[in-house]
Image (spheres, rainbow, N blue to C red):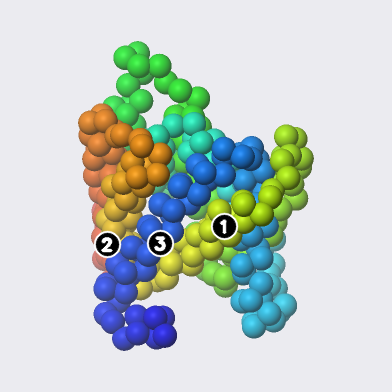
Amino acid sequence: MLHRRLKELPGSVRGVLWMMISNLFYALIYVVVRGLSESFSVNQIVFFRAILGSMFMLPWLFAAGIGALYTRRISTYLWRMLFSYVGAVAWMYSIAGMPLADANALMFTMPLFTVVLAAVWLAERPGLHRITATIVGFAGALIILRPGIVEVSAPALAALFAAAMFSGALIGSKMLTATENPNAMVFYLYTLMIPPAAIGAVFGWTNPVIADLPLLTALGICTVGAQQCQTRAFRAAPASLVVVINYVQLPLIALFGWLFFSQSTDIWTWAGAAVICTSTYYVSYREGRQNRALRKGKFPSSPA
């Protein structure tokens, strides 16, 4: 019913609404992971997330049939999963070990890492505007970390490492979207992640109890819900618009950190996040403008 009513709305409105719902799911993941980290290791939480993410996609698989999983790009799925798995371990380590808003602010560097990886990996030549925005964005991360003024923690470095790994996975996702079903992409991501996550979870395993079921169920629902809503948001509206809505995550996660864990967010985090968000929006805006020009047959004289 909700999906049918959303279809009747203009594309830009649908994109904003889907992204708002996705942001809520992502914010809740931070809360759930922080809560689970009090009972389980990070590796075990990643394993639970992979199992539950795969299970919550089974209704789609039963409806679509096994043929929906046919692919000739299993190698791309595999290396995309490895980037996602390593990134997930680092990301959840940062969530467990530092204020939620700080971890989230550092994760906004992901588009900046994507620019760097695309230049190295895909031989893309970023122009002066994109290089400048990337440097400014990483300066924002330094404002949050303040190396030399305060001790840079391992969880903070893990958040940056997670952003870099997720950037690699994002490049894999972009390569797959041209030929692959979005639901199949989600199913493959979590199903292929189960074996490596299981190996990591064996070390320091803690048996879950009945009291853990609400948080574990929420982890599965929020994981799949966030990805599904985000996919629909980018399909319905321009990326430059959707990316702006994505920044709602930070105040939402800061609010949840204060409500559930009595965490406070200092001015340096807000200042650094503002710099990071501005630079990543500029990168997305330039990319969107360049793509529109290409679709109209107007080739820009220089890279974005």
Contact check, label 1 and label 3, Cβ < 8 Å: no
Q: Amino acid at mark 2?
A: Leu
Comparing marks 3 and 2, which lies closer to the viewer? 3
The reply to whether residue 280 is visible in this rendering is no
Who's the residue at 50% across and 49% down the image?
32
> Could you tell me residue 223's position as x and y percent?
53, 58
> Could you tell me residue 227's position as x and y percent?
49, 62
Dot placed on the residue nearer the N-terminal end, 3 or 2: 3
Q: Is residue 186 above or below residue 97?
A: below
Label 3 to label 2, Cα distance in Å?
A: 14 Å
**What residue is disc 2 on?**
241
Q: Which mark is residue 22?
A: 3
Who's the residue at 64% across and 83% down the image?
63
Comparing marks 2 and 1, which lies closer to the viewer? 1
Who's the residue at 33% across and 41% down the image?
258
Q: Which mark is residue 214?
A: 1
> Could you tell me residue 230's position as x and y percent?
42, 63
Comparing marks 1 and 3, which lies closer to the viewer? 1
Who's the residue at 26% across and 30% down the image?
266
The reply to whether residue 44 is visible in this rendering is yes
Label 2 to label 1, Cα distance in Å?
A: 34 Å
> Could you tell me residue 124's position as x and y percent?
43, 47
Dot placed on the residue nearer the N-terminal end, 2 or 1: 1
Q: Amino acid at mark 1?
A: Pro
- Neighbour class for label 3 at 10 Å: few (<14), some, many (≥20)? many
- Quadrant where the N terminus is found in the figure: bottom left
